[in-house]
Image: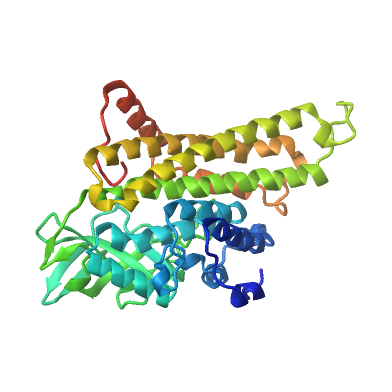
């Protein structure tokens, strides 16, 4: 993959519409696709890939236009993530997580804080990582004068070594107060480990991190004024927004698998010797399978787009978000997550039925799509997403905001 941004990115104005940004993402995907299988196999830290995201402008997509950002909303961001993930699921995930961590300041911070963070993120083209795994022991936060000191460890820290800044989260010692803060990724005491060695999403730099006395000013504690947190219902939109990011790269990976497989079938797959057809594309079972998988994928893409539009209304009026509107949105997201998981797993598995035995060659790399989906869809049990939907349908119950609902 070329490390240089295409010439037109440097000479033309940045995209100005959602459609133009999605087209820019498709251009990025085309570059990533040229050697996606080889890079997946090598598993090298994706410095070049992150620079590509920066050069293309995708990193600042959600940033304020007044400071040079894209000025786009979440509905466009989800589509951009999906487009990039078609070519490379790992880079799609990294971009999606970057958007989430960049938005964390707006999610829980004061207006002054998030305006500052968003402006600086655009000016310095920050790429965000995060160390906020709720299933690990809480990071301990202690006070030292006007500073906060974070100490602990996290099993996962997606983006780690390729990030410019990292979102930390911990609990203030002696209290139940959770504190989020953004620190430089090269901060003293922040040590990223090379221990991410999983079957899928190999380039996400999702290994562990040690947080050994990382200092940040009290003033950087998101949402705190005079050391007191100012809560809003909008703060609880983190999980549904996170889950929509997951859905986006699941659907992108599935679409990429289907497109790659279709190209293989057209150009390499041989018809069955007893089927009576000269070309694989004329085999009835091949035609039926592609039609079936495409219909299922289109259906869940349409659901995801509809739910994303519903969510954008909440983002557009953050002070008007209520417990009910948040809960109803989470139920819809849960339904989309369940379907996206099932369809993506089916698509990435069944493509081998219509590509043939030779398509399992390591050089083809078709297995990476299934490995990527299987790895990340274990993030949280999809059965609990279906339960949220079922309980709401049967009893009207709305999910209580937690780290996973």
Q: Is residue 99 left or right of residue 280?
A: left
- Name which quarter of the figure residue 25 lies in: bottom right
Against 54, residue 361 (above or below) is above
Residue shown at the point (10%, 68%) measured from the top left: 226
From the top left corner, tell me how far across and down residue 296 is, in percent: 58, 33
Coloring scheme used: rainbow
- Name which quarter of the figure residue 171 lies in: bottom left
Q: Is residue 82 left or right of residue 394?
A: right
Q: Which residue appears farthest toward the top when viewing the image?
A: 394
Depth order, front residue of 376/30: 30
Against 87, residue 217 (above or below) is below
Q: Quadrant of the C terminus?
A: top left
Whether residue 179 is visible to the viewer of this picture, yes or no, is yes
Q: Quadrant of the N terminus?
A: bottom right
Residue shown at the point (23%, 42%) measured from the top left: 322
Residue shown at the point (54%, 51%) measured from the top left: 82
Total marks in image: 0
Residue shown at the point (55%, 73%) measured from the top left: 55
Whether residue 45 is visible to the viewer of this picture, yes or no, is no
Depth order, front residue of 235/352: 235
From the top left corner, tell me how far across and down residue 48 is, in percent: 57, 71
Depth order, front residue of 333/32: 333
Q: Is residue 303 left or right of residue 234?
A: right
From the top left corner, tell me how far across and down residue 366 is, in percent: 67, 48
- Name which quarter of the figure residue 160 lies in: bottom left
Q: Is residue 268 left or right of residue 138?
A: right
């Amino acid at each position: 993959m070329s490390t240089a941004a295409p010439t037109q990115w440097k000479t033309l104005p940045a995209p100005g519409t959602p459609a133009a940004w999605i087209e820019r993402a498709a251009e990025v995907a085309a570059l990533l696709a040229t050697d996606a299988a080889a890079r997946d196999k090598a598993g090298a830290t994706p410095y070049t890939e992150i620079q590509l995201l920066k050069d293309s402008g995708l990193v600042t997509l959600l940033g304020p236009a007044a400071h040079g950002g894209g000025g786009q909303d979440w509905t466009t961001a989800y589509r951009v993530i999906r487009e990039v993930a078609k070519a490379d699921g790992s880079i799609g995930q990294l971009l999606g997580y970057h958007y989430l961590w960049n938005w964390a300041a707006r999610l829980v911070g004061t207006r002054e804080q998030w305006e500052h963070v968003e402006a600086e993120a655009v000016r310095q083209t920050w790429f965000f990582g995060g160390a906020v795994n709720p299933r690990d022991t809480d990071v301990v936060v202690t006070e030292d004068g006007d500073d906060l000191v974070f100490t602990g460890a996290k099993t996962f820290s997606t983006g780690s070594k390729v990030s410019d800044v990292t979102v930390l989260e911990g609990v203030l010692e002696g209290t139940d107060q959770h504190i989020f803060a953004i620190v430089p990724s090269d901060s003293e005491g922040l040590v990223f480990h090379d221990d991410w060695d999983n079957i899928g999403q190999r380039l996400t730099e999702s290994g562990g991190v040690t947080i050994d006395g990382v200092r940040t000013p009290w003033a950087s504690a998101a949402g705190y004024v005079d050391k007191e947190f100012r809560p809003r219902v909008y703060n609880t939109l983190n999980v549904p927004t996170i889950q929509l990011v997951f859905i986006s790269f699941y659907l992108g990976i599935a679409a990429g698998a289907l497109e790659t497989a279709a190209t293989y079938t057209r150009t390499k797959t041989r018809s069955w010797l007893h089927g009576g057809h000269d070309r694989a594309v004329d085999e009835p079972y091949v035609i039926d399978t592609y039609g079936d998988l495409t219909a299922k994928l289109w259906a869940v893409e349409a659901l995801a787009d509809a739910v994303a539009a519903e969510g954008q209304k909440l983002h557009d009026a953050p002070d008007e978000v209520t417990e009910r509107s948040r809960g109803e949105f989470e139920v819809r997201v849960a339904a989309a997550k369940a379907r996206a998981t099932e369809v993506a797993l089916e698509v990435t598995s069944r493509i081998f039925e219509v590509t043939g035995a030779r398509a399992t060659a390591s050089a083809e790399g078709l297995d990476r799509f299934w490995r990527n989906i299987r790895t990340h869809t274990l993030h949280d049990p999809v059965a609990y997403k279906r339960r949220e939907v079922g309980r709401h349908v049967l009893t009207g119950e709305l999910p209580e905001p937690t780290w996973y609902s």
